[in-house]
């Protein structure tokens, strides 16, 4: 009998943690792809370049974790995070920004959604975030 798939905090779980990168900047999506590829136990589920695409991608791809840029044209990351919390509470959302925490709207912190700086995003941080916030 095959053991059940787990999504615990251990990145060596039986199934890779599927990550969706949502950012309007292609350069960060490329960097996120590289970090995800370099992190054992994680795989890129897909990418989106705006909030609307990100919401549709969550429906289509069922990721475990969404990396979500705070500032995007159209629906910003804060609103996407609110919608995901209401419609897909099983999905872990990590807000990302080039800005300092004090410059990001305080609404991001109200839901307990972590915020990280793009400059600090690396395999070690991705593993730590999943260990802390993963299901």
Image (cartoon, rainbow, N blue to C red):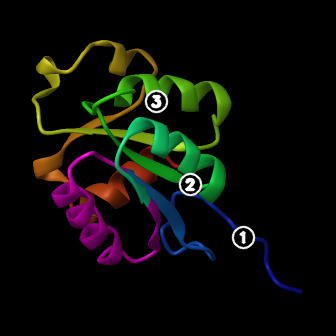
Which residue lies at the image location 62% right of the left edge and 60% below the top edge? 7
Which residue lies at the image location 64% right of the left edge and 55% below the top edge? 60
Q: Secondary structure at mark 2?
A: loop
Q: Residues within 10 Å of mark 1 (few under 14, many from 20)?
A: few
The residue wearing badge 2 is: 64
Q: Residues within 10 Å of mark 3 (few under 14, many from 20)?
A: many
Q: Is residue 128 above or below residue 11?
A: above
The residue wearing badge 3 is: 81
Label 1 – label 2 distance at C-alpha? 13 Å
Q: Which label lies toward us, 3 or 1? A: 3
The residue wearing badge 1 is: 5
Label 3 – label 1 distance at C-alpha? 26 Å
Residue 45 percent across, percent down from the top left = 50, 65
Q: Which label lies toward us, 1 or 2? A: 2
Which residue lies at the image location 50% right of the left edge and 23% below the top edge? 82
Q: Is residue 41 above or below residue 122?
A: below
């Amino acid at each position: 009998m095959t053991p059940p798939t787990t999504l615990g905090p251990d990145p060596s779980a039986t199934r890779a943690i599927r990550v969706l990168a949502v950012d309007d900047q292609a350069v960060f999506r490329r960097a996120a792809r590289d970090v995800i590829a370099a992190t054992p136990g994680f795989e890129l589920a897909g990418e989106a370049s705006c909030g609307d695409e990100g919401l549709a991608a969550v429906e289509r791809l069922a990721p475990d974790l969404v990396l979500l840029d705070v500032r995007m044209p159209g629906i910003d990351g804060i609103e996407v995070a609110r919608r995901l919390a209401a419609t897909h509470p099983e999905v872990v959302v990590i807000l990302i920004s080039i800005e300092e925490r004090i410059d990001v709207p305080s609404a991001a912190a109200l839901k307990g959604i972590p915020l990280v700086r793009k400059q600090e995003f690396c395999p070690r941080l991705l593993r730590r975030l999943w260990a802390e916030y993963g299901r």
